[in-house]
Image: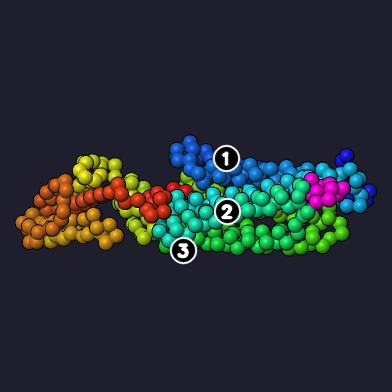
Amino acid sequence: MAHRSLDGASRSVEICAVLATFSVLSTITVALRTYIRLVLLRNFGLDDGLMVVAQILAIGSAIAIGLENKYGLGYHTWEQPKDNYVPYMKAFYASVIVYNIGICFVKIGILLQYRRVFALRLIQIITFYGVMFMIAWTITIAFLNILVCVPVAAVWDTTITGRCINRLTVWYVMAGFNLVTDIGIFCIPLPVIKSLQLPRKQKAMLLAIFCLGFFTCIISIIRIQTLRVAASTKDPNWDNVDAAIWSFLEVAIAVIAACLPTLRPLFSKLMPRMFASSSRSTGPPQYGPYVQAPSSQYLNDMKRTRTGKSQRSLSDDTMTLNENSGIPVPTHSYSVKSRLCPAIIVSISGGGKQDQPSENTESKDCGGGREAAEGGIQTTTTVIQQVAPERISEDGWNNSRRSDSDITL
């Protein structure tokens, strides 16, 4: 039997508006992420798959809350017929289970996304154990919520005598845990992003996108307050609306916040000045302690040989500037060896028409550089990269690093 209202008071419109709006927004966001990762980048990963599952659970939460609304949520309790109680409690029972599992899937997906993007060893360790812990926690709360009463039918059938745990205590524990993990998870990438060699506006935008996750922390705090109100009310059908809405919003907005960083290719087209990658410049990007050196963009002309190990070398990149280029020509030569990547050696030599370099350039040149034109500058970059098969990270995950300007989210 459908709900009824004697005085016309109803929060049904509020419930339906929130459910519909954020279901559409989160679905669009996940669809765009899937399209970018699967079609454009052809790099659909486990984190992307988990986010799709989390979105399905978010939609399931919206459906369950919608059924609650159909059977009395948003109306005064004393106005509802007794026949509505059983289907209302079944929908409520389902919404609690789907919400808790869904929010855990979002967090596991975010941690796996961090592992894919950030190669700093400390973050790899934190996220590895974070994923293991979240998997264990997901299994635990799934059983707690499913078996909140034994037999389960005692949740909605008052005629059945069963054993039930204190649901309010379980809800408070889970809500507090969600708040702590929200703060911890969304703080993980901030030091790394802050240290990236990016233009100020681009870095600010990237930080802003990641900081959207803190909005879910605010929602968690609000939700804890709504749980307290719902637990002490004498009109649960009316006062439980806030707890239901904020629970759904926590999952939906967490999904949106987790997907936004992966939409950078789309943002780059819409706002090219803000998100344009500096990798389009003529020179290689600057590298920091959290990124790969050299970037795969500059390894297009690799030559491969096989000995006892897999050895990859990059042919010399020699650029000659003649005297008409307008650039001052030095009368000496020198070599620079990368501190972060010792296999990269840059040699620069030059001189006037009558001058020759008085100092030999010492460089481990594997491909042989071209001689500088008379009166010009010769810049030779030699890159040698050896990859030993046994060099696998201790935690067994792929530790590929990204350049500051070419992070693929």
Q: Secondary structure at mark 1?
A: helix
Q: Is residue 31 visible?
A: yes
Residue neighbourhood size for the residue with mark 2, other residues' Cα within 10 Å, grouped as few (<14), some (14–19), many (≥20) = few
Specify the amino acid type for callout 3.
Answer: Pro
Measuring from the top left, give residue 49's x and y in whole percent: 54, 42
Q: Is residue 154 covered in magenta?
A: yes
Local secondary structure at mark 3: helix
For this rendering, which residue is in front, 142 or 179? 142
Query: Where does the image place residue 19, in percent across and percent down from the top left?
Result: 72, 46
Name the residue that disc number 1 marks. 31
Tag 3 residue: 191
The segment highlighted magenta reads 153-162
Label 3 to label 1: alpha-carbon separation:
29 Å
In the rendered view, does 224 fall on the left or right side of 45? right
**Disc number at residue 136?**
2
Q: Amino acid at mark 2?
A: Ala
Report how far apart the C-alphas of labels 2 and 3 lie in the structure: 27 Å
Work out whether residue 208 can be spotted: no
Q: Is residue 37 left or right of residue 349?
A: right
